[in-house]
Amino acid sequence: MRGVAITGVGIVSALGSGVAAHLEAMREGRTPLGPLTLFSPDDLGSFPVGEVDPALVPRRGPRSIRLALHAARQAVGGRALKSPGVLALGTTTGGILDSERHFLKHRGAIGAEDRELLLYHAMGTVTDVLGRALGLSAEGHTFSTACSSSANAIGFGASIVARRGGWALVGGVDSLARITYAGFHSLKLLSSSPCRPFDRHRRGLSLGEGAAFLLLESEEQARERGVPILGFITGWGCASDAYHPTAPHPRGDGAVAAIQSALADARLRPSDVDYVNAHGTATPANDVSEGLALQRVFGDDCPLTSSTKGLTGHTLGAAGAIESVLSLIALSSGFVPATAGLEEPDPEIPIRHVPSGGLARPLSVVVSNSFGFGGNNTALVLSRAPA
Amino acid sequence: MTPAVQSLGVVDALPVDPDPRVNRLPRLERLALGAAREALAGQKAPDSLGLVFATGYGGLTATEGFLRSVASRGMAFGSATAFHQSVSHSSAGQLSLLLGIRGPVLTISQRELSGEAALRVGLTLLDRIEHVLVVAADEQTSLLDAAYEVFGRVFRAAEGAAAVLLGPGPGRLRVERCELFSHRASVRRYAPPARLGPRLAESVRKNGRNVFVSIAAPTPAIERAERAALGPEARILEDQPGTARVGFHPSAGLVRFVLAARHLLATPGEAACVLHGLALGGGQSITVLRHDA
């Protein structure tokens, strides 16, 4: 994939709002994971989560839409996108935080009362409302491939820009919700302490929430407009495990195929990659499978690798977009974040960890991995803008 | 290369499978699998195959079941099975597993244009992979019916599934155009007739003679607007590919596409079909299916 320039970025997560806040938090290795306050966990007890500060995004109104708008407005940056383009968004929960409130209050009965809570249940409403609020003339696409949703939205939008030029606003959002909190608990995948990706003593994931968006334009259009190019999307690979409804392939077959496909799309060799922003959820199965996949792709010369989920929590459908923006921040700042929470690396995971405290190092090419339920594996390649 | 429609499948009632494991799958997955298997027509899936799955609401039965158990017993008592079946991508994952699809597997959810949006994404993926199976499925639940009733915006709610295998042309039919548009409308309304009418009329006019139209007709009022935009000369298929028969649901656009394709195949004198799609929130789609030269 050639000529897909990133000309705008927006992000909001438990780390804060905007690129500067996220770079600062990455440098500090700050871990904001803490007790859940957005709703009551009732009998379930409190597992640490990455909540967005209510001072940034008020809790009234449909939360996914609020989060998405917050990040998308940063990415667009007040520019008028008058020509038709593409709006591609990834989400797994859409507006379910509100519709589950309705369900729990009325026990599944639907009448006139509180019906506004149901308005945003369909995931596509987030895309519709976002497009309307930003005044976009865009074909809308809502990807819902579990935890790789927004990575696929980015890859799809980039491939449209590569093919026909123009612009695409791509990204993703997910808010914390009862269904995911109780659901991951039911699968015994929630960690009772802040998550520790790739650590020998990891006990599962910590949920998070947030949104991130990238404004993509053809390089030619961006140069004509004279806007700064922040980086490039150069590769998208997606492959299925066809192995199990929820568990990853134990040797990472689909992940290997996705990373190789993304590198082929970028016309790069494995040795060209400087840093891998891993999916790294801190579940026992994911981290081993991903480690083996990275070894199969990169051999003994694995690039520097870290997971940023110890910083943000696992933001599910938003993770691919949030981690793409964190990867872009690493590319543009030359600061490689360490894996927050990693203390004793698991010897069964054969990767080259970023040293504790992070590393100052110029990067040219980053691979960002996102994997999801149903055996979905997605990899994106981001490349640095020319100096 | 113009993408060709290679085969088709459609399901409007829950199929019974000789394999008991398949019959234990959730309703949505059985609908989707039935359509996908029909499109693959008993052949082995092609080696270079991707899947784009469309659904507006995913596994609603599982979502309701999970929330019901949380509501009645507490947050600690949600079912793990219901949770993973409530994830929209669960059906696509199951299809990839059962059909052995290891290429790109995506799930698209674009309200009542989910089927059309998946077709659009599938056509794009043909740049990357030789064949793409596009499957759309939505299940009807009493809760969804009640929600549609409360909002009062649907002609006849229904459920169903359809599948289309796309591949390199030439074939007997080709997808000449598949475009999505958005108009300003509230989340609970369709685009105003003044907005949707001109694009619909222009798409039919541009395709010349021997063209028939499948209108979206989600409500009587919108149906009147579509007919008014098309004028008395337009040939609207009233039976097979119409909403009156297939009902209205997020996957209905792909169901109508398959029925229109079958009508074209059975009627060599017809040149093309224009399919019009509409969604709450202001979405509109135009798809043109034509006999390949």
Image (tube, coloured by chain):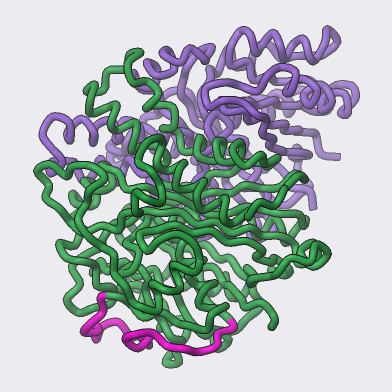
Chain colours: A green, B purple
Q: Which residues are magenta?
A: A341-364
Q: Is residue B18 visible?
A: no
Where is residue A177? Give x, y as percent.
30, 44
- Residue at point 59% right, 56% down? A75
The quarter holding residue A355 reads: bottom left
Viewer-closest of A116 and B287: A116
Q: Is residue A356 magenta?
A: yes
Query: Considering only vertical position in the picture, is B282 above or below B18?
Result: above
Where is residue A42? Give x, y as percent.
12, 41
Viewer-closest of A227 and A123: A227
- Residue at point 38% right, 43% down? A58
Where is residue B81? Give x, y as percent.
23, 44
Query: Considering only vertical position in the picture, is B79 above or below A317?
Result: above
Left or right of B100 in this view: B128: right
The quarter holding residue A21 reads: bottom left
- Residue at point 41% right, 32% down? A121
Where is residue A211? Give x, y as percent.
46, 54
- Assign the C terminus of chain B to one quadrant of the image: top right
Q: Is residue A305 visible?
A: yes
- Residue at point 30% right, 58% down? A50
